[in-house]
Amino acid sequence: MNTTLKKLKNISSENCITIIMNSHRTKPGYLKDELTLKNLIKEAENRLNENTVKKEADALVDKLQKLANDIDHSHNLDSLMLFVNKDTAKVVKLPIEVTDRVIIDNNFATRDLVRAMHIETNYFVLVLSQEKVRLIEAFNDKVVQEFDAPFPMENTFPMNKPEVTVSSRKTNLIAEFFNQVDKAVNLIRKENPLPVLICTVEENYAEYLKIADEKHSIFTTYLNKNRIAETDHAIVTEAYKIVETYKAKRNKERKAELDKAISENKFLSNTYDIYKAINEGRIQTLFIEEGLFQPAIITKDDVVYVSDFQRNDSNVIDDVYDELIEMNMRYGGDVVFMPQGKLDRFNGFGAITRY
């Protein structure tokens, strides 16, 4: 997801179409997803026809429809995103709920990808034993996928030979096996650098940490017990209890950053002031409540909110918050999504300045 976000957020061109919709994992829900997507593509087509040359609009709609036709809805997660412009055609499936909408702008609307990475918790579970290792990608308490090739990895070292019964020799062979596992995990993490929660017994956890190349990516706690034979769902259900505790601690720390910035007068809540500060490279962190969307017009003197009925106008940004998040990320800033009601006194949106 991180790789996809990096690619999409750097794309800028006319008519970047983002279609975002909730989807379903099981019957009968996913049987309706094709119709929902068809209706959203029709909405995109109508908006393109209002503001775009017909030949270009037809080409983009054709690209959307071809992309949609390739989707196997029986393998949907909880939401679906389509990204299309003249050079791009990309589908992303996410295990989070979203607000169904169509955005047509000069950039793709990647806010839900950002939200998925920040407010939700995407991680790997390394199910570790001395004989076999599995790797599962999880999102909160849901299984995204269990990896194959090279997982599951089997220990092929001759652990049962008489000469291996010597404790030091056995320890060395286990370390070598774990080292092979660690290299395979980090190869996958190179494309998708998620944190790793280890599921194993205490002895194996300690030995694995000795050989791990990227200890900073491994949770400082672990899921205790040999669960190598359990289902992926059962493992992730237990793993998330640990991850949830970590997430609560992280959210508390980010909230403390916000409170400290307010006391030090390093906090902005006016949207135009934040827009100017982003362009000056002064914003470190944006704070936004979940579910907050706002069409707007940005001028050199102001950010003017408009009604949802005006969002199709050619000079209107579909969601000004998404636009500001994108801008700030290009300057190296980050974003924190807060539960609804946590930023009431700032109308749901604010920023910490660097100085």
Image: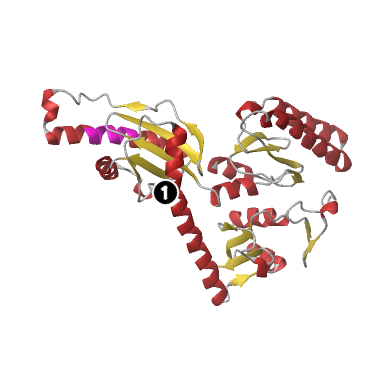
Magenta part of the chain: 174-181
Residue 10 visible in the current orientation: no
- The reply, left or right, for residue 23 in relation to residue 55 is left
228 lies left or right of 313: left
Q: What is the quadrant of the N terminus in the image?
A: top right
Q: Position of residue 62 (x, y in %)?
A: 78, 28
Q: What predominant SS class does the magenta segment belong to?
A: helix
In the image, 53: left or right of 81? right
Q: Residue shown at 29%/36% (left/top)?
A: 179
Q: Which residue is mark 1?
A: 242
Q: Classify mark 1: residues with Cα within 10 Å, few (<14), some (14-19) or many (20+).
A: some
Question: In this orientation, does residue 262 appear?
Answer: yes
* Front-most of residues 82 and 127: 127
Is residue 172 a member of the stretch shown in magenta?
Answer: no
| Residue 96, position as x, y percentages in the image | 60, 43
Q: Is residue 1 left or right of residue 202?
A: right
Q: From what the image shows, is residue 346 above or below residue 38?
A: below
Say which amino acid is labelled 1. Answer: Ile
Circle 1 SS class: helix
Q: Is residue 176 magenta?
A: yes
